[in-house]
Amino acid sequence: MSMISEINLTRKRAQVGERGRSKMSLLARREARWGLFFISPWLIGFTIFYLFPMIASFIFSTLNFTLSSPETTTFIGFENWRRMLVDDPNVWEGMWITFKFAIVSLPLGMIIAFGLASLLNSKDLIAPNLFRTLFYAPTMVPFIAAVLIWSQVLNPNTGWLNRIIELFGIPARGQNGLRWMDDPNLIYISYTFIGIWGIGNTILIYLASLQGVPTELYEAANIDGASWWNRMWNITIPMITPVIFYNLITSLVGLLQYFLVPWVLNQGSGYPEGASRFYMVWFYKQAFTFQNMGYGAALAWLLFIVALAITIFLFATSRYWVYYAGENK
C-alpha cells in the first residue's frame, strides 16, 4: 500500500471516529433532555416551594416587616441579624436549651430504637409480625393526641408511671414525689418519653438494615467462635453504619426544630423555670404571636445555618466511621 493510500485510510478512520463521537454526544444530549424532562416536576416544585421561599425569607430578614401593618415595611439592612446575635438573650438561651435536650434525647432515642429493632429481628422472637405492628402502631396516633395522653400518664398524682413506680416501694406520688412535668431536672426525660412513643419509623428503618446484613458473615463468625457481642460490634454495627448515620442526621435536624410538645403543654411559657423555652418556641412567638415576620425570618435563617454547619461536620467526619459496601477503608 502506497503512502498516499495509507494517509487516505487514516483520514477516513478519523472521519468515522469523529462522526461516532458526535453521534454519541447527540445521544448523550438527548438522554440529558429526557432526564431533565422526567425530573422537571421535582425541579419545578423545589423552585416554587423551597428556593423562592428561602430567597423571600432572606429578603424579609432585612426588613422591618410586621404582618399586622405591612404598609409600614421598611428596609433596615442587617439590623435584625445584629439584634438577634447581640441584643436578644432569648435566642442563645433557646439554642442552649435545645442542645441540652438533644444531648439527653438523641442518644436515648437512637439506642432504644436500635435495641428494639434488634429484638424484633431475633429468630427466637415469638409472633414477630405482631410485635412489629404493636411497636409501629403508636406512630399512627396524631401527635398532639399522644402529647395529651402522656401528660396524663406523667401526672404526679394520678399518672400511671408514678403508680407503677410505687409498686416497687418507691414514693413517687404527691407533692414530694416525681413531678415529671414540673421539675426542670426531669422535664427533658419526660419529653424523651413522649418522643420514644413515636419511634416506630426509626425502628422500622433499623429493622430493614439489620435484615440486609449478609448472613454468611454471621456464619463465618460462628465458625470462629465469636460471641454475641463480638458479632454485634464487629459485624452488625459496621454494616449498618450508613443507616445509623441517616437516622443521626434526621433525628438531629428534627430535634433542632423541637416545638410541638412544649407548645402544646405550656403554650410557650417556658414552664418550669424556663426549661421548656426552646429556640423554636421563641421563633414562633416572634413570627406569629408578635407578627414580627422580619425578625422571625432572621431567626429561621440562624437555625438553618446552625443545622447546615452540624450536617456538614457530620458528613466530613462520616468517612472515619461510616462503611459502605465495596468501599475500602
Image (cartoon, rainbow, N blue to C red):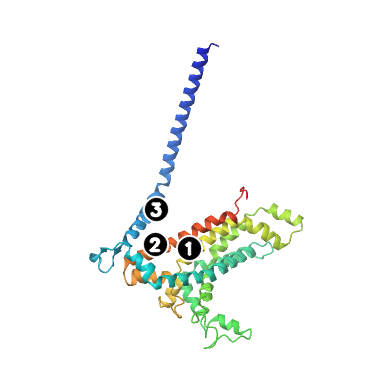
Q: Residue at x 37, y 54 (%)?
A: 51
- Residue at 38 percent of width and 66 percent of height: 299
Badge 3 amino acid: Phe
What percent of the width, then of the height, locates residue 111? Answer: 59, 66
Quadrant in the picture for residue 280 = bottom left
* Residue 115 in sight from this viewpoint: yes
Residue 195 location, x and y as percent? 52, 70
Q: Which mark is residue 301?
A: 2
Query: Crowdedness of circle 2 by 10 Å Cα count: few (<14), some, many (20+)?
Result: some
Q: Secondary structure at mark 1?
A: helix
Q: From the top left corner, tell me how far across and down residue 242 is, in percent.
A: 57, 56
Viewer-proximal residue among 46 and 275: 275
Earlier sequence position, callout 3 versus callout 1: 3
Q: Nearer the viewer, residue 26 or 142?
A: 26
The residue tagged 3 is 46
Task: Name the spot of residue 162 as percent of width and height, x first.
Answer: 56, 82
* Front residue of 150 and 84: 84
Mark 1, residue position: 253
Q: Earlier in the sequence, mark 2 or mark 3?
A: 3
Q: Residue at x 57, y 83 (%)?
A: 163
Q: Tell me the SS state at disc 3.
A: helix
The answer to whether residue 292 is left or right of residue 122 is left
Left or right? Give the position of 250 relative to 223. left
